[in-house]
Image (tube, helix red, strand yellow):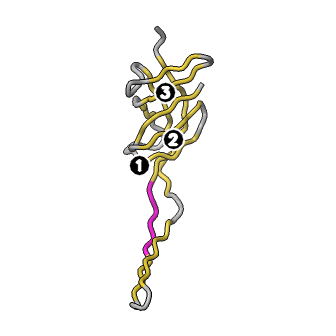
């Protein structure tokens, strides 16, 4: 069983016990997070596709805390102008562990 969810304007394919890095969510460590924007659920041979979201479906995750992604370097350079600029950026993300994918029967 897997699901395609949307959070932080991005889509993720998740299954039970997956660990996913999503855009920063304001939650405490160890807290349960219920993601209701489920776009698709595949359970065995049945596929539930939302329009745009699957009604009465949600993914329950456990927050494992905030982490920072590796640094991304942006280097700007203009030839013959003695102009260069080096900027680094580290994005804060929330680490989630998928506990359960629920969909209402019927």
- Disc 1 target residue: 24
Q: Which x, y percent locates residue 28?
A: 42, 43
Q: For numbered disc 1, what is the local secondary structure?
A: loop
Give the magenta range. Answer: 87-92
Of residue 2 and residue 20, the one placed in the foreground of this image is 2
The residue that label 2 is drawn on is 96
Which mark identifies residue 40? 3
Name the image quarter holding residue 17.
top right
- Type of secondary structure dominating the magenta stretch: strand
Viewer-side residue, 80 vs 97: 80
Q: Are marks 3 and 2 in contact (CB under 8 Å)?
A: no
Q: Is residue 102 within the magenta segment?
A: no
Q: Quadrant of the N terminus?
A: top right
Element on which disc 3 rests: strand
Kindly state the secondary structure of the residue where label 2 is placed.
strand
Q: Residue at x 49, y 57 (%)?
A: 68
- Within 10 Å of disc 2 (Cα), the crowding (few <14, some 14-19, many 20+) is many
């Amino acid at each position: 069983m897997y699901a395609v969810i949307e959070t932080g304007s991005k889509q993720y394919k998740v299954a039970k016990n997956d660990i996913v890095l999503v855009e920063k969510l304001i939650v405490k460590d160890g807290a349960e997070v219920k993601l209701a924007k489920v776009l698709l659920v595949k359970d065995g041979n049945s596929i539930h596709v939302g329009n745009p979201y699957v009604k009465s479906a949600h993914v329950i995750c456990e927050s494992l805390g905030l982490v920072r992604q590796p640094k991304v370097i942006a280097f700007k350079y203009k030839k013959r102008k003695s102009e260069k600029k080096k900027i680094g950026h580290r994005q804060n993300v929330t680490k989630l562990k998928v506990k359960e994918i629920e969909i209402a029967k019927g």
